[in-house]
Image (cartoon, grey):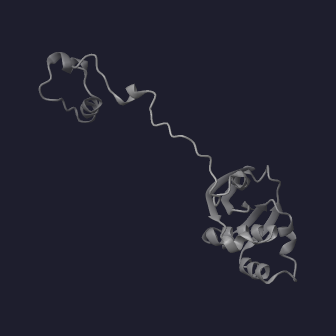
């Protein structure tokens, strides 16, 4: 599965087992300034090229299917008079045995979800006050009503190696 947005390209390597998609690896690359000027088709093609470069060792001798939400990519591989950049990418992808299937965004959920995230390049953020008080300070304290109660490490050592702490009374040994 491949997807592109104005900020990043994403790819998911996965396999289908009994009609269910099982992801194996997720990959994401942010788009630089030059790639941000690409058209939508070029960005989607960049996502496919990125996926095949990233997962080359898994895909080189295997038949694979590319799921994308951009239907123009299906016809782009048969086109002979495309831009030089697209032709270079098509030549790069010719060593792989794959077919392109157009899917809706709802079916392409693994890669389409991050496209809803905010722009990482924007410096606009919502300044919020930091609350430095921890409401339950009692969580940081361990209080024992009975000082003869053994500590967790003592219990773990006893069960792991039958070690008993020196100086324990017979009542403390019975609690173990």
Total marks shown come to 0
Q: Quadrant of residue 97?
A: bottom right
Q: Is residue 104 left or right of residue 116?
A: right
Observer-nearest of 84 and 120: 120
Left or right position of 143 against 47: left
Query: Looking at the picture, how far across and down is residue 27, in whole percent?
Result: 62, 61
x and y percentages locating residue 150 in the rendered image: 25, 24
Residue at the outermost left position: 167
Q: Position of residue 78 (x, y in %)?
A: 87, 77
Residue 48 sits in quarter: bottom right
Q: From what the image shows, is residue 150 above or below residue 37?
A: above
- Is 155 placed left or right of 122 in the picture? left
Q: Residue at x 77, y 60 (%)?
A: 67
Q: Quadrant of the N terminus?
A: bottom right
Quadrant of the image containing the C terminus: top left
Quarter of the rendering containing residue 129: top right
* Position of 27 relative to 133 (above/below): below
Is residue 112 or residue 132 the one in the foreground? Answer: 132
In this view, the residue in front, 85 or 36, is: 36
Residue located at (15% from left, 17% from top): 170
Residue 17 in picture, x, y percent from top left: 70, 52
| Horizontal side of residue 143 vs 17, given as left or right | left
Question: Residue at horizontal 73%, vertical 66%?
Answer: 64
């Amino acid at each position: 599965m491949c997807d592109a947005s104005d900020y990043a390209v994403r790819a998911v390597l996965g396999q289908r087992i009994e009609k269910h998609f099982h992801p194996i690896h997720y990959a994401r690359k942010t788009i630089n300034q030059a790639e941000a000027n690409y058209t939508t088709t070029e960005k989607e093609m960049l996502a496919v090229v990125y996926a095949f470069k990233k997962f080359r060792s898994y895909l080189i001798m295997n038949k694979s299917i590319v799921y994308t939400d951009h239907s123009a990519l299906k016809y782009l591989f048969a086109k002979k008079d495309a831009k030089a950049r697209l032709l270079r990418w098509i030549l790069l992808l010719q060593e792989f045995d794959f077919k392109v299937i157009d899917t809706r965004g709802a079916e392409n959920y693994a890669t389409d979800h991050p496209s809803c995230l905010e722009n990482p390049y924007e410096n606009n953020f919502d300044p919020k006050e930091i609350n430095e008080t921890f409401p339950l300070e009692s969580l940081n304290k361990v209080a024992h009503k009975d000082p003869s109660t053994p500590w967790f490490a003592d219990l773990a050592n006893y069960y792991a190696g039958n070690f008993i702490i020196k100086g324990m009374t017979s009542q403390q040994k019975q609690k173990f």
